[in-house]
């Protein structure tokens, strides 16, 4: 929470920490980072403090994760300003919305590498495969960039970026094991177990470092009395296994090679409410999905006399067995991603230049939905970023040219300025353009997905255009030793939003497609603040106001709360006991309700309260105990009729032991 904001690197002392992986050369003693400094790398792929980063950025630290009951990335980010964790299907799957933009517009990175299994599930059933693929025990911190940064990261960063920085192996051997049990006090079932083990250290002194993380999560299906269909699940049954391992070879003092290997198994089983339904469709269809993902990466990092370099290849293959009664049988789906990229960062005079190239290839095979069995797409890109300053005014200019084999060229420029009124107080703002290419399911004419609750098919449209957005923001932030605050206003104009054709009164075709029909405008205000009330008591909060509009209809965008607020009170009662009280307010939002002829209704606001306690019995042994949704808040009839049911009061207990 607290950090000292006064530290800034001058041009000759700035060290590059590209994507959080490159080692930072030693700084002069007088300019060394202070103990509580919070540093980020995602905004520019170079190192900045949270205060002086040229973007709206938030960091969730390892300490933040330890004081919450967190099962996936969505849980970890639910209190971040400008972020909403929104339900995407009736059985509890969620997506990350940043500043009102849906989950498809949030780019998820792990150590700067794209995580992307979204193509494997082209339907609207809800795809949160990526959010549950990262073991919580492996995370060092999570950096969230609010607003588009396509100038560095290309497509899919139209809403923002979530970069998960993993723990890095050190010379000293570290090991830990942990276990958490979660038990809902309302409804039927829903008990969950999460266990993890972590070990890292030196395999060969001063030459080879390694780490391994293994994590398992198992949750029973949960049924709620709030459901209109007593046979349907409010939360699906889920079993997840994650394994991440890494090796770092210290080739020389200024070169190292990283090898990363990951495995993710994600099995889901659910019965969901399908009323109203097509005459031939079941009222409570059974859905089983079994996903296996293999990923590997090979990276060379170099720190040379005048510049730093990175060359990297990473591979990801996802195999999904998708068996739903609505689909009429099981389908085998395989998505394969190959990415090669390179980057160079260094000074040219007083200008810190970062340039790079990237090539990505994605192939999707589907045994039922693709006419010829597979589709593919390739993209390449080149980008350049320039960071320089005039006294207290720091400027960041960047641009990226992407070439898509189907959609041609897209140029994404960005300009950002930061003015330091003092070491503690800054003004900053900028403008950027971003884009998102259609998915393979949306753009491939031979690709069809089941929709309309089993009564129609949606086929791809090869004539689609990429979605684009222009975003503006301006704000100010102040950080002192014991308190801080900030305010940021933003305005996004989005064009050519892609949506599927939809049934309406007197319009019920059996085959539909995707169209560029929407224009949208999202504007808002983010307020943040924190204060150390006492030496052992701190208070932090944020409030986000959103005003969204579908320009084609004049209506609010669906599932976009008009207000979101968070308040957190931390109390360190003693060296042994600490406690956290977390309150969240989610404002009213528009929801389309299938049980009401798919019409849109406004769902009322709701609020939740979580209590978390930690007990450090010894330096090696920690216990945690807490309650989520302490007041057993329930959402209104609009939300529950749409099967978006809030999990009731839930108790959890856990233990962590550091070896």
Image: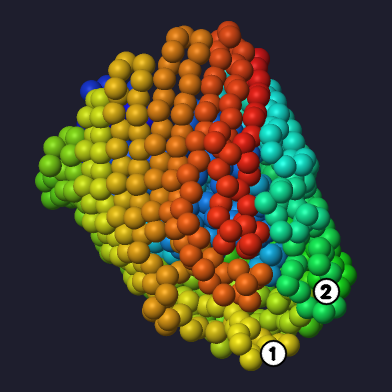
Is label 1 in a helix, a strand or a loop? loop
- Say how many tags the image has: 2
Residues 61 and 102: in front is 102
Q: Residue under label 2, please give it.
A: 281
Label 2: few (<14), some or many (≥20) within 10 Å? some
Indicate the position of residue 231 as horizontal and vertical percent values: 81, 55
Could you tell me if residue 659 is visible in this image?
Answer: yes
Q: Nearer the viewer, residue 382 or 131?
A: 131
What residue do we see at 70% from left, 55% from top? 227
For disc 1, the marked residue is: 509
Which mark is first along the chain, 2 or 1? 2
The percent position of residue 290, horizontal first and vertical second, equals 80, 55
525 or 607, which is in the foreground? 607
Quarter occupied by residue 320: bottom right
Left or right of 399 on screen, residue 179: right
Apparent side of residue 233 relative to residue 572 in the rendered image (left or right): right
Local secondary structure at mark 2: loop
Q: Residue at x 36, y 59 (%)?
A: 546
Q: Residue at x 65, y 59 (%)?
A: 643
How packed mark 1 is, by other alpha carbons closer than 10 Å (few <14, some 14-19, many 20 or more), is some
Residue 591 pos. (x, y %):
54, 66
> In the rendered view, would you say 261 is above or below 593?
above
Q: Furthest-right residue in view?
A: 329
Asked whether the viewer can see residue 107, the reply is no
Rounded to the nearest angstrom, the CA distance separating label 1 from label 2 is 17 Å
- Name which residue lies at 74% across and 36% down: 191
């Amino acid at each position: 929470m607290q950090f000292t904001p006064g530290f800034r690197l001058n041009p000759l002392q700035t060290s590059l920490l590209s994507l959080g992986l490159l080692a930072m050369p030693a700084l002069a003693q007088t300019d060394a980072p202070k103990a509580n400094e919070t540093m980020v790398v995602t905004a520019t792929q170079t190192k900045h403090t949270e205060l002086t980063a040229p973007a709206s950025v938030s960091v969730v630290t390892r300490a933040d994760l330890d004081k919450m009951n967190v099962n996936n990335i969505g849980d970890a980010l639910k209190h971040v300003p400008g972020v909403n964790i929104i339900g995407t299907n009736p059985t509890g799957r969620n997506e990350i919305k940043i500043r009102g933009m849906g989950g498809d517009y949030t780019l998820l990175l792990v150590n700067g590498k794209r995580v992307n299994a979204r193509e494997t599930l082209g339907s609207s059933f809800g795809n949160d495969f990526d959010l549950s693929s990262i073991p919580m025990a492996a995370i060092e911190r999570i950096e969230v960039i609010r607003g588009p940064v396509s100038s560095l990261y290309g497509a899919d960063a139209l809403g923002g970026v979530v970069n998960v920085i993993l723990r890095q192996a050190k010379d000293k051997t570290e090991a830990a094991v942990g276990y958490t049990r979660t038990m809902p006090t309302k409804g039927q079932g829903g008990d969950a177990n999460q266990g993890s083990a972590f070990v890292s250290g030196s395999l060969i002194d001063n030459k080879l470092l390694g780490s391994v993380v293994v994590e398992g999560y198992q949750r029973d299906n949960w049924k709620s009395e709030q459901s209109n269909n007593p046979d349907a699940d409010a939360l699906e049954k889920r079993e997840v296994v994650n394994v991440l391992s890494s090796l770092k070879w210290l080739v020389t003092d200024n070169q190292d090679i990283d090898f990363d290997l990951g495995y993710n198994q994600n099995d889901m089983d659910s019965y969901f409410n399908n009323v109203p339904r097509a005459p031939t469709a079941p009222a409570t269809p059974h859905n089983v999905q079994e996903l296996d993902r293999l990923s590997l990466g090979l990276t060379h990092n170099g720190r040379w006399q005048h510049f730093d370099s990175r060359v990297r290849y990473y591979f990801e293959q996802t195999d999904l067995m998708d068996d739903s009664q609505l689909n009429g049988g099981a389908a085998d789906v395989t998505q394969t991603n190959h990415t090669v990229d390179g980057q160079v960062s260094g000074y040219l005079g007083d200008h810190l230049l970062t340039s790079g190239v990237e090539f990505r290839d994605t192939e999707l095979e589907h045994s039922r939905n693709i006419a010829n069995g597979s589709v593919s797409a390739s993209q390449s890109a080149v980008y350049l970023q320039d960071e320089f300053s005039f006294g207290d005014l720091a400027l960041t200019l960047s641009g990226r040219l992407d070439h898509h084999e189907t959609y041609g060229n897209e140029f994404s420029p960005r300009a950002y300025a930061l003015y330091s009124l003092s070491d503690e107080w800054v003004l900053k703002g900028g403008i950027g353009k971003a884009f998102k290419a259609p998915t393979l399911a949306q753009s491939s004419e031979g690709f069809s997905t089941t929709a309309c609750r089993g009564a129609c098919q949606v086929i791809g449209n090869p004539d689609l255009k990429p979605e684009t957005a222009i975003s503006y923001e301006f704000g100010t932030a102040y950080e002192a030793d014991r308190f801080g605050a900030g305010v940021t206003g933003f305005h996004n104009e989005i064009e050519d939003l892609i949506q599927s054709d939809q049934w309406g009164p007197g319009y019920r075709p059996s085959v539909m497609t995707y169209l560029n029909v929407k224009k949208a405008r999202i504007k808002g205000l983010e307020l943040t603040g924190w204060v150390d009330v006492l030496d052992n008591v701190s208070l932090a909060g944020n409030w986000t106001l959103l005003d969204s509009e579908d320009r084609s209809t004049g209506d609010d965008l669906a599932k976009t709360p008009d207000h979101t607020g968070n308040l957190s009170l931390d109390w360190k009662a003693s060296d042994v006991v600490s406690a956290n009280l977390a309150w969240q307010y989610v404002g009213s939002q528009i929801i389309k309700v299938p049980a009401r002829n798919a019409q849109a209704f406004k769902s009322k606001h709701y609020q939740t309260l979580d209590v978390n306690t930690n007990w450090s019995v010894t330096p090696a042994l920690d216990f945690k105990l807490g309650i989520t949704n302490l007041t057993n808040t329930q959402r209104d009839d609009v939300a529950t009729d749409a099967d978006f049911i809030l999990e009731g009061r839930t108790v959890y207990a856990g233990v962590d032991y550091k070896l």
